[in-house]
Amino acid sequence: MTNQLIEWCTSEIAGLKERHLFHMPKVHQSAVGARVIIDGKKVIQLSNNSYLGLSTHPKVKEAAIKAIEKYGVGSGAVRPISGTMDLHVECEEKLAKFKKTESCLLFQSGFTANVGVVSTLAVAGDHIISDELNHASIIDGARLSKATRAVYRHKDYGHLEELLKEARGPKSITGKILVVTDGVFSMDGDVADLKACADACEKYDAITMVDDAHATGVLGEKGRGTVDDQHMHERWSLTVGTLSKAIPVVGGYYAGPQIVKEYLIAKARPFLFSASAPPAVVAAVSACVDVLENEPQHHAKLWENTKFFKQGLKDLGFNTGNSVTPVTPVIVGDGAKAAKLSEILLENGVYAQGIYFPMVAEALSRVRTIVSASHSREDLQEALDVFKKCGKQLGLI
Ligand code: PMP
């Protein structure tokens, strides 16, 4: 083995460490929930995406166990060869009904769903226009596509309209234009304005796509997502989402017209060339959709907790940005401070992840908090008390 690779990694990592950009994942020794065990210590968890607390829901666990008993552990192949079970088809039907779309197609993750959908639907001669704060998987999908690309300033739909005008005018794009936005932006917890986006897109015959990763289970009636929340079913083209957040298993999906699904089945490379989700996963996802449809109390509790915790942080004097969802950032100003805050929070029994450049601009470095329906009022009050103590210690409040 050449030393060159080892030396290169060593020097790169040293550089990352110097800039507080290297973090080994914290290892959890317990199930996803309001309190978790990290390094043998029980702490309040404010960093997972299981918004509704369904990871340990008895009906969800039972569905996964039964699926293993009947189908075993793997799907056997990629979907088009022999990796499509009745479980996959039923799950797609349930999700489509839940999202109120004509069809739905499962992918292995939200990441591969975005990469697959964006790179497959936008081809040479087409144009992709993306919000500057969109998720990495949308960016990677656009990079893989042979379409040209442009980026509009975050939620600046006037800028989006300028770019659309330029595309149809001086750039002479006669092909498809795909405009992509996150529904809830994962670092800030703010929400795209789908109406303003669609108003601009309709003028220039552009296709609209939303990544509902942080909105499904959170926004809209029973958590149907951003399109439902903003009453945009008639005016919105495509939705992509994950099955690893409010639906807390793993996987991703496309939701939209049946004919687009069929094209993705024929052409989307993650669908064609990577094995499908195992039976336990698919059965658990289906059970979660049933829970979303039939047990509205989780959704109600999520929002009750969100309001309490967000107001609590604001009252303490923290800068919580523009969040209107369960994702609430505590913006501290630089990477070193964010790392320190995250570290002392953990020492005091609260796990809230630090978020730094390149995920956000250095000056917007933060600790990101996410509450869930599984937190009790005591959990959240205790977390606020710890934030108060640590915030004072670092001179943030
Ligand atoms: N989109 C957004 C907005 C996300 O936050 C994430 C997950 N971090 C993804 C897509 C990818 O989803 P998955 O984890 O299922 O690959």
Image: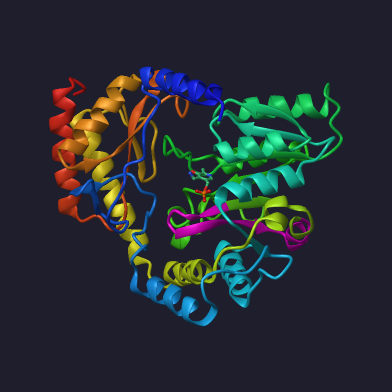
Residue sitting at x 83%, y 21% = 170
**Residue 176 location (% of width, % of height):** 80, 40
Residue sitting at x 48%, y 43% = 184
Say whether residue 90 is left or right of residue 303: right
From which residue to which does the magenta span run? Answer: 241-263
Q: Residue 383: which quarter of the image?
A: top left
Residue 361 visible from this viewpoint = no
Placement of 55 over or under 28, stated as above or below: below
Placement of 54 over or under 7, stated as above or below: below
**Residue 114 location (% of width, % of height):** 62, 46
- Coloring scheme used: rainbow
Q: Residue 82: which quarter of the image?
A: bottom right
The residue nearer to you, when weighing 116 against 382, is 116
The residue nearer to you, when weighing 391 against 270, is 270
**Residue 232 location (% of width, % of height):** 60, 52
The residue nearer to you, when weighing 358 against 293, is 358
Residue 212 visible from this viewpoint = yes
Residue sitting at x 55%, y 31% = 155
Which quadrant: the N terminus?
top right
Say whether residue 274 is left or right of residue 65: right
Placement of 111 over or under 391, stated as above or below: below
User: Can residue 250 be found in the magenta stretch?
Assistant: yes
**Residue 109 location (% of width, % of height):** 56, 53
The residue nearer to you, when weighing 19 against 175, is 19
Which quadrant: the C terminus?
top left
The residue furthest bottom is 70
Residue sitting at x 39%, y 41% = 324
